[in-house]
Image (cartoon, rainbow, N blue to C red):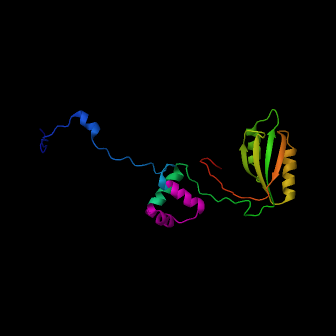
Amino acid sequence: MARGAKIIDRVIDIDDRKFAERPARQPDKSSPHDKLNNSIITMLQDDGRMAFSEIAQELGVSEGTIRNRVASMKQAGMLRIVAIADPVAVEYKSDAMLGLKIAPGHTPQAVAQRLSGLPDVVYVLWVSGRFDLLIEVVSNDRDGFLNFLDTEIHGQSDVASSETMMGLKNFKNQFLLKRNWN
């Protein structure tokens, strides 16, 4: 026996190991299912500039915990804090949704890619139903919107038809940010 070794009077059977207590597994600090993460995200959605100390106080945890959780969620690609201008709040003069039918020989993806690069287009969604794409367009004035329609919609061979729905009053405007949102 090695020097300094002690004899233990109880031998552990190999089968007893599976019943031994294991340390509790720590939840993933970047998980979208974590209750604390959801609370942090909710608070940041209301005010993206809210101080970590204020969030910590409200949630009853340390400021360091909030800082670490936010960093983990950012690194995991689950959280991105950005500024988004609300078209209604900045008082654009023209806000419209357009339903587009794509012309034969063209794809919704190609048209969506073309329109997504335009500064007046703030929303592009591939949909099922009577339209292929729904897009939202905001312009500084009516002439800018008419020019957009003439050059980017009516003057293009990849759009078979369109229906313009002018915005009259906005009742809710909530931006939901997704993992790879650009």
The one nearer the camera, 54 or 114, is: 54
> Which residue lies at the image location 87% right of the left edge and 53% below the top edge?
146
Please state the extent of the stretch shown in magenta in the rendering. 37-64
Query: Residue at left 29%, top 44%?
Result: 21
x and y percentages locating residue 2 in the rendered image: 13, 40
Report whether 19 appears left or right of 166: left
* Apparent side of residue 142 relative to residue 89 in the rendered image (left or right): right
Q: Main secondary structure of the magenta part?
A: helix
Q: Is residue 159 magenta?
A: no
Please name the residue shown 48% across and 53% down the image: 35
Give how far across and how far down residue 110 sits, in percent: 75, 39
Verify whether residue 55 appears in magenta.
yes
Q: Give the image quarter of residue 172.
A: bottom right
Number of numbered tags placed on the structure image? 0
Query: Which of the two residues, 141 or 2, is positioned nearer the viewer here?
Result: 141
Tell me residue 153's x, y (percent): 84, 45
Q: Residue at x 87, y 45 (%)?
A: 154
Among the 4 quarters of the image, the one containing residue 8: top left
In the rendering, at what x and y percent does residue 71 appear? 50, 55
Q: Relative to the observer, which residue lies in front, 20 or 138? A: 20
Which quadrant: the N terminus? top left
Q: Is residue 1 left or right of residue 142?
A: left
